[in-house]
Image (tube, rainbow, N blue to C red):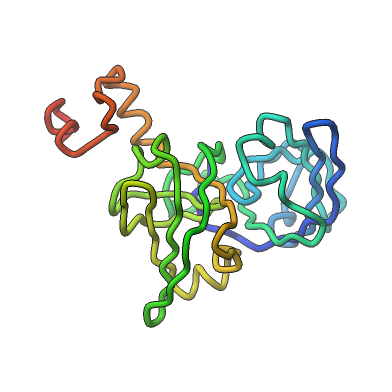
Amino acid sequence: MFTGIIEEIGTVAEIRRGAASCVLTVRAKKVLEDVHIGDSIAVNGVCLTVCRTDGSTFAADVMPETMRRTTLGTLVPGSRVDLERAMAADGRFGGHIVSGHIDGTGTVRSLTREDNAVWVTIHADASLLRYIVVKGSIAIDGISLTVARVTADSFAVSVIPHTAGETILLEHRPGDRVNLECDIVAKYVERLMGGRTSGGGVTEALLAENGFL
């Protein structure tokens, strides 16, 4: 499990591609301080298992399903990536529950500055937007963020200077794809309700009607 608080920005050192998979090697420092074979590290929000490390890099196998569902297939040597180790049992829970299992990808629509913050608007499919609510949590490339706006085909977050400086989020440009992981709580609520959402997703009215509010 992760929290969505990025620990450092790493750099892709090598990608060895198979027919539909790859072995990804990432150069890093902080996340390698206590790394062991078999540990989990989130790369742009994707939970990967360390299969090799030499003290300055780690390598992970990326299966075809992960390549299909995420943006890892677009990486090239030199690409910068957000990195986070799995949460330690005695650590602070600074973000929200992030599993590292990507629900799908979105497309950056715009980046607009407002004083000290930057609004980032992401286009996403309806299958993802059904779980995204104003003031709820979303992980974009593994970054824990609070949703500030939602429309019929997009959502937006407001990014503070600290987040901008510690992640690759504002390095994206309109048209770039990003990994999205929706708040797992919304998905569990929908599942517990046995799909009784009438195609409208999890709404405040639906939660109240079924005793969650």
Of residue 64 and residue 145, the one placed in the foreground of this image is 64
* Above-or-below relation of 68 to 57: above
Q: Quadrant of the C terminus?
A: top left
Residue 136: image location, x then y, percent: 32, 49
In this view, which residue lies farthest toward the top? 194
Left or right: where 213 falls relative to 134: left
Q: What residue lies at 32% left-to-right and 46% top-to-bottom?
A: 152
Q: Residue at x 65, y 34 (%)?
A: 68
Q: Is residue 33 left or right of residue 153?
A: right
| Residue drawn at 63 percent across, 57 percent down | 82
Q: Residue furthest bottom?
A: 115
Residue 5 location (% of width, % of height): 52, 57
Q: Is residue 169 above or below residue 74?
A: below
Q: Going 79% across and 54% down the picture, which residue do you hit?
A: 76
State which quadrant residue 73 falls in. Answer: top right
Q: Is 8 located above or below residue 72 in the figure?
A: below
Determine the image quadrant of residue 204.
Answer: top left
Residue 177, given in percent of the width and then of the height, sits at: 58, 52
Q: Quadrant of residue 10?
A: bottom right
Viewer-proximal residue among 161 and 69: 69
Number of numbered callouts drawn:
0
Q: Between 90 and 85, which is closer to the camera in this rendering?
A: 85
Residue 97 point in image, percent of width and height: 44, 43
Lateral position of residue 3 relative to residue 167, left or right: left
Nearer to me, 15 or 111: 111
